[in-house]
Image (cartoon, rainbow, N blue to C red):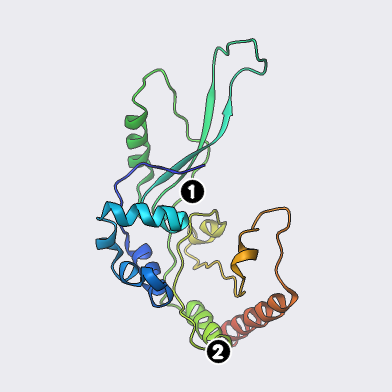
């Protein structure tokens, strides 16, 4: 389901750093990724990004998708009440209360009750610490010439539990996944190669050794 825009496109520092890290290997998107703050001001560029890479486009705004709908459980009964559950992903610097006020204003119907079911603190881990430097070194050692950049994703992560305690946390997947296999993520045939498992495990061990040896 296509995510609906709830805020004007803008680039927050963490997202800007991510796009800049991707730029060297971004092909035709190289120039745009080097200055996404400027690129998102052009509507045509945004539409093209949405068409070619929805996951990157989603990093330029808050997004919401209706993922559950519920009304009557019989075809011939008009439900006295209906509800929708909406999955919203906020930019890292977004104030949750401010977003809820904006969301309520967009709905603009006093008869619709809006309740927050679950919500987490948007957080970013610093890249200026021994753990990140160990990750950077391990990646460059195993994959010479690779670009290393802190990623910002629209997906869910449990890292927020650690970040809320002041612990730097990163989602690291040191695997070279072919595009055809990456499309099967969370699917019935999700898989990675044995070579990837071996290589990725070696990278992980290198990171752990570097950190614990300090």
Q: Quadrant of the C terminus?
A: bottom right
Q: Is residue 117 above or below residue 89?
A: above
Q: Quadrant of residue 185?
A: bottom right
Label 1: state its secondary structure.
Answer: loop
Q: Residue at x 36, y 19 (%)?
A: 110
In the rendered structure, the answer to whether residue 68 lies left or right of residue 127 reads right
| Residue 126 seen in the figure | yes
Q: Which residue is mark 2?
A: 141
Count the marks.
Answer: 2
Which element type, helix, strand or loop, lies under badge 2? helix
For this view, does 107 lie left or right of residue 72? left
* Image spot of residue 176 (x, y percent): 61, 75
Alpha carbon distance from label 2 to label 1: 35 Å
Q: Vertically, is 25 above or below 73? A: below
Badge 1 crowding class, 10 Å Cα cut-off, few under 14, some 14 to 19, many 20 or more, is few
Q: Nearer the viewer, residue 209 or 201?
A: 201
Please report the residue visible at 41 percent of the width from the left and 73 percent of the height from the top: 27
First along the sequence among labels 2 and 1: 1
Rendered residue at 65%/65% (across/down): 181
Is residue 92 shown to the viewer in this render? no
Q: Judge depth for marks 2 and 1 and give the one in front.
A: 2
Q: Write down the residue under mark 1.
A: 120
Residue 28: percent from left, percent from top: 38, 70
Residue 44, percent from left and from top: 30, 53
Q: Quadrant of residue 112?
A: top left
């Amino acid at each position: 389901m296509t995510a609906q825009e709830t805020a004007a496109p803008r680039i927050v520092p963490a997202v800007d750093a991510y796009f800049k890290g991707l730029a060297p290997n971004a092909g035709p998107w190289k120039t745009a990724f080097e200055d996404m703050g400027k690129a998102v001001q052009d509507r045509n560029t945004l539409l093209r990004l949405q068409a070619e890479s929805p996951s990157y486009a989603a990093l330029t705004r808050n997004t919401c998708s209706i993922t559950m709908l519920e009304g009557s459980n019989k075809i011939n009964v008009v439900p006295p009440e209906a509800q929708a559950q909406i999955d919203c992903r906020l930019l890292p610097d977004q104030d949750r209360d401010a977003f809820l006020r904006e969301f309520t204003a967009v709905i603009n119907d006093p008869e619709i009750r809006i309740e927050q079911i679950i919500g987490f603190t948007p957080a970013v881990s610093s890249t200026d610490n021994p753990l990140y430097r160990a990750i950077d070194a391990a990646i460059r050692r195993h994959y010479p010439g690779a670009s290393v950049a802190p990623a910002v994703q629209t997906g869910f992560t449990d890292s927020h539990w650690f970040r809320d305690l002041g612990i730097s946390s990163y989602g690291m997947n040191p695997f070279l996944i072919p595009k055809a296999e990456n499309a099967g993520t969370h699917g019935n045939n999700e898989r990675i190669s044995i070579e990837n498992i071996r290589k990725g495990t070696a990278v992980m061990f290198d990171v752990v050794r570097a950190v614990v040896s300090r």
